[in-house]
Image (cartoon, rainbow, N blue to C red):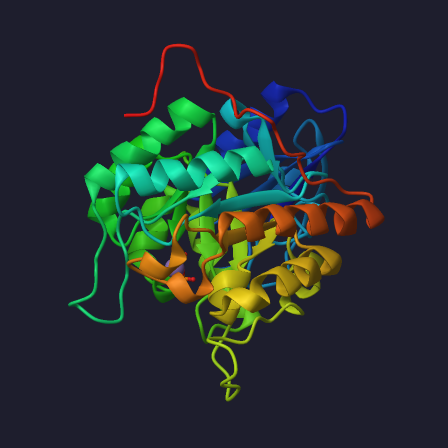
Amino acid sequence: MLIVMKTAATEEQVRAVCERVEALGLRAHPMPGATRTAIGITGNKSDIETGTFDEMLGVQEVIHVSKAYKLVSREVKGETTVVRFPSAGATIGGNEVAVIAGPCAIESREQAFAAAERIARAGAKFFRGGAYKPRTSPYAFQGLGEEGLRIMADIRDHFGLAIVTEAVDNESLDLVEKYADMIQIGARNMQNFSLLKRAGRSRTPVLLKRGMSATLDEFLMAAEYIMSEGNYNVVLCERGVRTFADHTRNTLDLSVVPAVQRLSHLPIIVDPSHGTGKRNKVTPLSRAAVAVGADGLIVEVHPDPEKAMSDGAQSLYPDQFDQLMYEVRQIAAVLGRSVASPVAQPAVPAATTAR
Ligand code: PEP
Ligand code: MN
Protein backbone atom coordinates (compact mmCIF):
# COMPACT_ATOMS: atom_id res chain seq x y z
CA MET A 1 0.00 0.00 0.00
CA LEU A 2 1.04 3.55 -0.69
CA ILE A 3 0.05 6.75 1.05
CA VAL A 4 0.42 9.83 -1.13
CA MET A 5 0.81 13.00 0.91
CA LYS A 6 -0.43 16.41 -0.21
CA THR A 7 2.10 18.78 -1.77
CA ALA A 8 1.72 21.07 1.21
CA ALA A 9 1.96 18.30 3.84
CA THR A 10 4.32 19.19 6.67
CA GLU A 11 7.14 17.06 8.02
CA GLU A 12 5.14 16.47 11.20
CA GLN A 13 2.19 15.16 9.18
CA VAL A 14 4.49 12.76 7.32
CA ARG A 15 5.99 11.67 10.63
CA ALA A 16 2.55 11.12 12.17
CA VAL A 17 1.54 8.84 9.30
CA CYS A 18 4.80 6.88 9.61
CA GLU A 19 4.24 6.47 13.34
CA ARG A 20 0.73 5.14 12.80
CA VAL A 21 2.11 2.65 10.24
CA GLU A 22 4.78 1.47 12.66
CA ALA A 23 2.20 1.23 15.48
CA LEU A 24 0.39 -1.35 13.36
CA GLY A 25 3.57 -3.44 13.35
CA LEU A 26 4.32 -2.49 9.71
CA ARG A 27 7.20 -0.64 8.11
CA ALA A 28 6.92 2.87 6.65
CA HIS A 29 9.20 3.99 3.81
CA PRO A 30 8.86 7.74 3.23
CA MET A 31 10.01 8.59 -0.31
CA PRO A 32 10.30 12.32 -0.89
CA GLY A 33 9.61 13.28 -4.51
CA ALA A 34 9.98 16.54 -6.42
CA THR A 35 6.48 17.74 -5.50
CA ARG A 36 5.22 15.45 -2.74
CA THR A 37 6.17 12.62 -0.42
CA ALA A 38 4.80 9.12 -0.86
CA ILE A 39 4.98 6.62 1.99
CA GLY A 40 5.34 2.98 1.00
CA ILE A 41 4.08 0.40 3.50
CA THR A 42 5.55 -3.07 3.71
CA GLY A 43 5.10 -5.96 6.08
CA ASN A 44 1.35 -6.37 5.73
CA LYS A 45 0.13 -9.90 5.03
CA SER A 46 -3.34 -8.74 4.01
CA ASP A 47 -4.96 -5.48 2.93
CA ILE A 48 -4.89 -2.66 5.43
CA GLU A 49 -8.09 -0.67 6.06
CA THR A 50 -7.54 2.46 3.98
CA GLY A 51 -9.76 4.38 6.40
CA THR A 52 -6.99 4.13 8.99
CA PHE A 53 -5.05 6.75 7.03
CA ASP A 54 -7.58 8.47 4.77
CA GLU A 55 -8.58 10.99 7.39
CA MET A 56 -5.14 11.88 8.68
CA LEU A 57 -3.89 15.42 8.17
CA GLY A 58 -1.83 15.93 5.03
CA VAL A 59 -2.93 12.69 3.35
CA GLN A 60 -3.96 13.10 -0.27
CA GLU A 61 -4.72 9.54 -1.26
CA VAL A 62 -4.28 5.93 -0.16
CA ILE A 63 -3.66 3.50 -3.01
CA HIS A 64 -3.09 -0.21 -3.33
CA VAL A 65 0.09 -1.00 -5.28
CA SER A 66 -0.74 -3.69 -7.78
CA LYS A 67 2.81 -4.91 -8.51
CA ALA A 68 4.70 -7.44 -6.41
CA TYR A 69 7.58 -4.98 -6.21
CA LYS A 70 6.50 -1.88 -4.41
CA LEU A 71 9.34 0.35 -3.30
CA VAL A 72 11.21 -0.02 -6.61
CA SER A 73 8.06 0.75 -8.59
CA ARG A 74 7.29 3.94 -10.49
CA GLU A 75 3.85 3.82 -8.90
CA VAL A 76 5.56 4.76 -5.64
CA LYS A 77 7.82 7.42 -7.12
CA GLY A 78 7.25 9.00 -10.52
CA GLU A 79 10.63 10.60 -11.08
CA THR A 80 13.89 8.70 -11.49
CA THR A 81 15.96 8.36 -8.34
CA VAL A 82 19.20 10.32 -8.35
CA VAL A 83 21.93 8.72 -6.24
CA ARG A 84 24.43 11.34 -5.08
CA PHE A 85 28.16 11.11 -4.40
CA PRO A 86 28.95 14.61 -3.15
CA SER A 87 32.64 14.01 -2.45
CA ALA A 88 33.21 13.15 -6.13
CA GLY A 89 30.77 15.75 -7.46
CA ALA A 90 28.91 12.88 -9.13
CA THR A 91 25.41 11.49 -9.48
CA ILE A 92 23.81 8.40 -11.01
CA GLY A 93 20.32 8.85 -12.41
CA GLY A 94 20.63 12.57 -13.12
CA ASN A 95 21.33 14.29 -16.41
CA GLU A 96 24.99 13.28 -16.49
CA VAL A 97 25.70 9.77 -17.75
CA ALA A 98 27.88 8.28 -14.99
CA VAL A 99 31.03 6.42 -15.95
CA ILE A 100 32.59 3.87 -13.58
CA ALA A 101 35.90 2.44 -14.77
CA GLY A 102 38.84 0.44 -13.48
CA PRO A 103 40.44 -2.96 -13.50
CA CYS A 104 38.51 -6.15 -12.82
CA ALA A 105 40.68 -6.76 -9.75
CA ILE A 106 43.05 -4.65 -7.67
CA GLU A 107 46.35 -6.46 -8.20
CA SER A 108 48.85 -4.00 -6.72
CA ARG A 109 49.11 -0.35 -5.68
CA GLU A 110 51.07 0.46 -8.85
CA GLN A 111 48.54 -1.19 -11.17
CA ALA A 112 45.57 0.45 -9.45
CA PHE A 113 47.11 3.95 -9.40
CA ALA A 114 48.20 3.66 -13.04
CA ALA A 115 44.62 2.77 -14.03
CA ALA A 116 43.07 5.46 -11.81
CA GLU A 117 45.29 8.20 -13.16
CA ARG A 118 44.14 7.57 -16.73
CA ILE A 119 40.52 7.09 -15.72
CA ALA A 120 40.39 10.37 -13.81
CA ARG A 121 42.08 12.17 -16.70
CA ALA A 122 39.52 10.80 -19.15
CA GLY A 123 36.76 12.43 -17.07
CA ALA A 124 35.24 9.43 -15.24
CA LYS A 125 34.19 10.16 -11.65
CA PHE A 126 34.03 6.61 -10.35
CA PHE A 127 36.76 4.01 -9.92
CA ARG A 128 35.93 0.30 -9.83
CA GLY A 129 38.15 -2.58 -8.75
CA GLY A 130 37.57 -5.90 -7.06
CA ALA A 131 39.19 -6.63 -3.69
CA TYR A 132 37.00 -9.73 -3.29
CA LYS A 133 36.57 -11.62 -6.55
CA PRO A 134 33.86 -14.23 -7.12
CA ARG A 135 35.80 -16.57 -9.42
CA THR A 136 34.52 -19.65 -11.22
CA SER A 137 37.61 -21.58 -10.10
CA PRO A 138 38.69 -21.76 -6.45
CA TYR A 139 42.30 -21.78 -7.72
CA ALA A 140 42.00 -18.46 -9.59
CA PHE A 141 43.13 -15.15 -8.03
CA GLN A 142 40.59 -14.25 -5.33
CA GLY A 143 41.58 -10.61 -4.77
CA LEU A 144 43.74 -8.76 -2.23
CA GLY A 145 40.97 -8.43 0.36
CA GLU A 146 41.28 -5.55 2.80
CA GLU A 147 44.62 -4.48 1.34
CA GLY A 148 42.80 -3.92 -1.97
CA LEU A 149 40.20 -1.80 -0.16
CA ARG A 150 42.94 0.31 1.42
CA ILE A 151 44.49 0.94 -2.00
CA MET A 152 41.14 2.10 -3.33
CA ALA A 153 40.58 4.40 -0.35
CA ASP A 154 43.95 5.98 -1.17
CA ILE A 155 42.84 6.37 -4.78
CA ARG A 156 39.79 8.28 -3.59
CA ASP A 157 41.99 10.56 -1.48
CA HIS A 158 44.42 11.10 -4.32
CA PHE A 159 42.14 11.55 -7.34
CA GLY A 160 38.75 12.40 -5.80
CA LEU A 161 37.13 9.41 -7.53
CA ALA A 162 34.19 7.63 -5.88
CA ILE A 163 35.01 3.97 -5.16
CA VAL A 164 32.81 1.08 -6.32
CA THR A 165 33.74 -2.42 -5.17
CA GLU A 166 32.10 -5.78 -4.68
CA ALA A 167 31.08 -7.49 -1.44
CA VAL A 168 30.78 -11.25 -1.89
CA ASP A 169 29.32 -12.09 1.54
CA ASN A 170 28.21 -10.43 4.78
CA GLU A 171 31.74 -10.48 6.17
CA SER A 172 33.29 -8.67 3.21
CA LEU A 173 30.35 -6.25 3.15
CA ASP A 174 31.26 -5.09 6.68
CA LEU A 175 34.67 -4.09 5.32
CA VAL A 176 33.56 -2.78 1.92
CA GLU A 177 31.12 -0.44 3.67
CA LYS A 178 33.98 1.04 5.69
CA TYR A 179 36.09 1.91 2.66
CA ALA A 180 33.86 2.30 -0.41
CA ASP A 181 31.36 4.84 -1.75
CA MET A 182 29.24 2.17 -3.42
CA ILE A 183 28.77 -1.54 -2.65
CA GLN A 184 28.60 -3.80 -5.70
CA ILE A 185 26.51 -6.96 -5.47
CA GLY A 186 27.67 -9.28 -8.24
CA ALA A 187 25.62 -11.25 -10.74
CA ARG A 188 26.28 -14.51 -8.89
CA ASN A 189 24.85 -13.01 -5.71
CA MET A 190 21.76 -11.31 -7.14
CA GLN A 191 19.54 -13.75 -5.26
CA ASN A 192 21.69 -14.11 -2.16
CA PHE A 193 18.87 -12.84 0.00
CA SER A 194 20.80 -12.55 3.25
CA LEU A 195 23.46 -10.46 1.46
CA LEU A 196 20.75 -8.28 -0.14
CA LYS A 197 19.18 -7.69 3.27
CA ARG A 198 22.55 -6.85 4.79
CA ALA A 199 23.17 -4.33 1.97
CA GLY A 200 19.71 -2.94 2.69
CA ARG A 201 20.74 -2.18 6.26
CA SER A 202 23.75 -0.22 5.02
CA ARG A 203 23.59 3.50 4.30
CA THR A 204 26.07 3.17 1.42
CA PRO A 205 24.58 3.15 -2.12
CA VAL A 206 24.35 -0.28 -3.76
CA LEU A 207 25.11 -1.31 -7.35
CA LEU A 208 23.03 -4.42 -8.01
CA LYS A 209 24.10 -6.49 -11.02
CA ARG A 210 21.56 -8.60 -12.85
CA GLY A 211 21.97 -12.36 -12.40
CA MET A 212 23.06 -14.13 -15.54
CA SER A 213 19.72 -15.87 -15.92
CA ALA A 214 17.48 -13.46 -14.04
CA THR A 215 14.19 -12.24 -15.47
CA LEU A 216 13.18 -8.61 -15.17
CA ASP A 217 10.84 -9.47 -12.29
CA GLU A 218 13.55 -11.36 -10.39
CA PHE A 219 15.94 -8.44 -10.94
CA LEU A 220 13.47 -5.90 -9.56
CA MET A 221 12.52 -8.15 -6.64
CA ALA A 222 16.20 -8.39 -5.69
CA ALA A 223 16.30 -4.58 -5.57
CA GLU A 224 13.10 -4.65 -3.52
CA TYR A 225 14.90 -6.80 -0.91
CA ILE A 226 17.51 -4.07 -0.47
CA MET A 227 14.99 -1.23 -0.34
CA SER A 228 12.65 -3.08 2.02
CA GLU A 229 15.41 -2.88 4.64
CA GLY A 230 15.62 0.91 4.28
CA ASN A 231 18.43 1.55 1.78
CA TYR A 232 16.84 3.50 -1.08
CA ASN A 233 20.06 4.30 -2.94
CA VAL A 234 20.05 1.37 -5.34
CA VAL A 235 21.39 1.41 -8.92
CA LEU A 236 20.66 -1.52 -11.25
CA CYS A 237 23.21 -2.89 -13.71
CA GLU A 238 22.68 -4.96 -16.86
CA ARG A 239 25.78 -7.11 -17.43
CA GLY A 240 24.67 -9.68 -19.98
CA VAL A 241 22.71 -12.90 -19.69
CA ARG A 242 23.33 -16.50 -20.73
CA THR A 243 22.04 -17.43 -24.17
CA PHE A 244 23.00 -19.91 -26.91
CA ALA A 245 25.10 -17.20 -28.61
CA ASP A 246 28.77 -18.07 -28.26
CA HIS A 247 30.45 -15.20 -30.10
CA THR A 248 30.38 -13.23 -26.85
CA ARG A 249 30.82 -14.19 -23.18
CA ASN A 250 27.22 -13.15 -22.43
CA THR A 251 24.44 -11.52 -24.42
CA LEU A 252 24.09 -7.90 -23.39
CA ASP A 253 20.35 -7.38 -23.01
CA LEU A 254 20.02 -3.68 -23.78
CA SER A 255 16.27 -3.98 -24.12
CA VAL A 256 16.06 -4.38 -20.36
CA VAL A 257 17.04 -0.70 -19.95
CA PRO A 258 13.77 0.82 -21.25
CA ALA A 259 11.87 -2.11 -19.69
CA VAL A 260 13.27 -1.25 -16.25
CA GLN A 261 12.71 2.46 -16.79
CA ARG A 262 9.05 1.88 -17.51
CA LEU A 263 8.49 -0.06 -14.29
CA SER A 264 10.98 1.40 -11.85
CA HIS A 265 12.33 4.76 -10.71
CA LEU A 266 15.76 3.25 -10.01
CA PRO A 267 18.65 4.26 -12.28
CA ILE A 268 20.07 1.56 -14.54
CA ILE A 269 23.61 1.37 -15.92
CA VAL A 270 25.23 -1.07 -18.37
CA ASP A 271 28.39 -3.21 -18.14
CA PRO A 272 29.60 -3.84 -21.70
CA SER A 273 32.80 -5.54 -20.42
CA HIS A 274 31.20 -8.58 -18.77
CA GLY A 275 28.35 -8.21 -21.24
CA THR A 276 30.58 -9.08 -24.19
CA GLY A 277 33.81 -10.48 -22.71
CA LYS A 278 35.74 -9.01 -25.65
CA ARG A 279 37.67 -5.77 -25.73
CA ASN A 280 36.76 -4.98 -29.35
CA LYS A 281 33.05 -5.01 -28.51
CA VAL A 282 33.15 -2.83 -25.42
CA THR A 283 33.13 0.57 -27.14
CA PRO A 284 30.38 -0.26 -29.68
CA LEU A 285 28.13 -1.61 -26.91
CA SER A 286 28.93 1.41 -24.72
CA ARG A 287 27.70 3.66 -27.52
CA ALA A 288 24.56 1.55 -27.81
CA ALA A 289 23.97 1.60 -24.05
CA VAL A 290 24.08 5.38 -23.91
CA ALA A 291 21.84 5.58 -26.99
CA VAL A 292 19.25 3.27 -25.41
CA GLY A 293 19.06 5.59 -22.40
CA ALA A 294 21.27 3.97 -19.75
CA ASP A 295 22.13 6.20 -16.79
CA GLY A 296 25.74 5.09 -16.84
CA LEU A 297 28.43 2.61 -17.83
CA ILE A 298 30.76 0.38 -15.84
CA VAL A 299 33.82 -0.52 -17.89
CA GLU A 300 36.97 -2.54 -17.19
CA VAL A 301 40.21 -0.69 -17.95
CA HIS A 302 43.70 -2.02 -17.20
CA PRO A 303 47.07 -0.31 -17.70
CA ASP A 304 48.45 -3.57 -19.15
CA PRO A 305 45.55 -5.89 -20.07
CA GLU A 306 47.83 -8.63 -21.39
CA LYS A 307 49.16 -9.12 -17.86
CA ALA A 308 45.81 -8.78 -16.04
CA MET A 309 45.13 -11.39 -13.37
CA SER A 310 41.45 -11.48 -14.32
CA ASP A 311 39.32 -10.47 -17.28
CA GLY A 312 42.23 -9.18 -19.37
CA ALA A 313 40.53 -10.06 -22.67
CA GLN A 314 37.66 -7.68 -21.97
CA SER A 315 39.73 -4.90 -20.38
CA LEU A 316 40.36 -1.76 -22.42
CA TYR A 317 43.76 -0.14 -22.85
CA PRO A 318 43.68 3.38 -21.37
CA ASP A 319 43.89 4.94 -24.86
CA GLN A 320 40.83 2.97 -25.90
CA PHE A 321 39.00 4.25 -22.84
CA ASP A 322 39.80 7.85 -23.87
CA GLN A 323 38.25 7.11 -27.25
CA LEU A 324 35.20 5.50 -25.63
CA MET A 325 34.62 8.61 -23.52
CA TYR A 326 34.95 10.82 -26.58
CA GLU A 327 32.38 8.79 -28.50
CA VAL A 328 29.78 8.40 -25.74
CA ARG A 329 30.01 12.11 -24.96
CA GLN A 330 28.70 12.87 -28.43
CA ILE A 331 25.93 10.29 -28.25
CA ALA A 332 24.82 11.58 -24.85
CA ALA A 333 24.59 15.11 -26.27
CA VAL A 334 22.09 13.96 -28.91
CA LEU A 335 19.82 12.88 -26.05
CA GLY A 336 20.32 16.11 -24.11
CA ARG A 337 22.54 14.37 -21.57
CA SER A 338 26.20 14.85 -20.78
CA VAL A 339 29.35 12.87 -20.02
CA ALA A 340 32.01 14.63 -17.97
CA SER A 341 34.87 16.22 -19.92
CA PRO A 342 38.48 15.10 -19.74
CA VAL A 343 40.60 16.84 -17.16
CA ALA A 344 44.18 17.88 -17.85
CA GLN A 345 45.30 17.18 -14.33
CA PRO A 346 43.10 15.07 -12.06
CA ALA A 347 42.41 16.69 -8.70
CA VAL A 348 45.20 15.90 -6.29
CA PRO A 349 44.62 17.18 -2.77
CA ALA A 350 47.80 18.94 -1.64
CA ALA A 351 48.56 16.67 1.28
CA THR A 352 48.44 13.34 -0.53
CA THR A 353 50.89 11.68 -2.88
CA ALA A 354 50.93 8.26 -4.50
CA ARG A 355 52.51 5.60 -2.32
C1 PEP B 1 32.91 -7.70 -11.94
O1 PEP B 1 32.32 -6.60 -12.02
O2 PEP B 1 34.16 -7.79 -11.99
C2 PEP B 1 32.10 -8.94 -11.87
C3 PEP B 1 32.57 -10.04 -11.30
O3 PEP B 1 30.89 -8.79 -12.43
P1 PEP B 1 29.64 -9.81 -12.52
O4 PEP B 1 29.16 -10.01 -11.13
O5 PEP B 1 28.67 -9.05 -13.39
O6 PEP B 1 30.13 -11.08 -13.18
MN1 MN C 1 35.62 -8.68 -14.14
Q: Residue furthest left?
A: 139
Q: Is residue 40 left or right of residue 209?
A: right
- 336 vs 8, nearest the viewer: 336
| Residue displayed at 20% across by 45% down | 145
- Work out whether 8 lies above or below 29: above
Report whether 5 appears left or right of 169.
Answer: right
Image coordinates for residue 227, horizontal then vertical, percent: 47, 47
The residue at the point 32 percent across, 51 percent down is: 105
Q: Nearer the viewer, residue 97 or 348?
A: 348
Vertical arrangement, residue 336 with respect to residue 168, above or below: above
Q: Position of residue 247 (x, y in %)?
A: 52, 83
Q: Quadrant of ligand 2?
A: bottom left
Identify the residue at horizontal 66%, vertical 44% (top origin). 97
Which image quadrant is residue 70 in? bottom right
Going by the image, does 223 lie left or right of 186? right
Vertical comparison of 251 with 103: above or below: below
Q: Is residue 265 visible?
A: no
Residue 251 horizontal/vertical position (percent): 54, 76
For the view shown, which residue lies furthest in the bottom direction? 244
Residue plotted at (42% across, 66% down): 313
Image-quadrant location for residue 163: top left
